[in-house]
Amino acid sequence: MSCASTFICVSVLLAVVAIVLASGCVQQGSTSPGAGGIVASPPAGSYGQAPGQGQTSGGNQQPAANNYNVEISGLSFNPQELSVKKGDAVTWTSMDSVPHTITSDSGVELNSGLLAKGVSYSHTFTQEGTFAYHCRIHTSMKGTITVEK
């Protein structure tokens, strides 16, 4: 086998490995209780409630659920404390160059796995209560989601 053929084979092999690794790192998942999905695209808006969310038009329609955004930057969650309604979703997006997690302090409500820079994790809260969470890697990073009726 010539040098050029070996180079092409190695290049193709590296490309295949990169594709396999990338497809395993960014997954779509459920956002039901006890499970979380990693989403490849960042959410709309910066943090807090996304513009235009939760609006309905006319009639006896139930208000649509809201989506709230938490930015992870500077080794902190922003906002650190957030109050939402039952049925609302929260999306955390990592802006730091080091990986982070969204991990419940107790139970399994929140469990994002590793979030690299630019990667998001969303969870829809279906139960009322206070959900304290932290980064499993950087234990000083803490946050709280309060879910009301």
Image (spheres, rainbow, N blue to C red):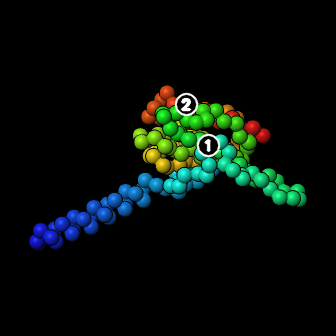
Classed neighbour count for the residue bearing mark 2: other residues with Cα under 10 Å, few (<14), some (14–19), many (≥20): many
Residue 15 in sight from this viewpoint: yes
Classed neighbour count for the residue bearing mark 1: other residues with Cα under 10 Å, few (<14), some (14–19), many (≥20): many
Residue 123 in sight from this viewpoint: no
Instruction: Residue at 22%, 64% (x, y): give it.
Output: 10
- Judging from the image, what secondary structure is the residue with disc 1 in? loop
Nearest-to-viewer mark from 1 and 2: 1
- The reply, left or right, for residue 115 in relation to residue 149 is left
Is residue 21 or residue 80 the one in the foreground?
A: 80
22 up-or-down from 101: above or below: below
Q: Position of residue 120 (x, y in %)?
A: 53, 48
- Label 1 and label 2: CA atoms lie apart by 16 Å
Q: Position of residue 57 (x, y in %)?
A: 83, 58
Q: Which residue is mark 1?
A: 47
Instruction: Residue at 64%, 32% (x, y): give it.
Output: 81
Instruction: Residue at 52%, 51% (x, y): give it.
Output: 38
Is residue 5 or residue 108 the one in the foreground?
A: 5
Residue at the extreme right of the image, as rendered = 59
Q: Earlier in the sequence, mark 1 or mark 2?
A: 1
Q: Amino acid at mark 1?
A: Tyr
Q: Position of residue 64 (x, y in %)?
A: 76, 53
Total of numbered circles in the picture? 2
Is residue 126 or residue 142 the one in the foreground?
A: 142
Q: Position of residue 106 (x, y in %)?
A: 57, 32
- The reply, left or right, for residue 1 in relation to residue 21 is left
User: Quadrant location of the N terminus?
Assistant: bottom left
Q: Amino acid at mark 2?
A: Lys
The disc label shown at residue 92, or none:
none
Q: Which residue is mark 2?
A: 142
Residue at the extreme left of the image, as rendered = 2
Instruction: Residue at 32%, 64% (x, y): give it.
Output: 16
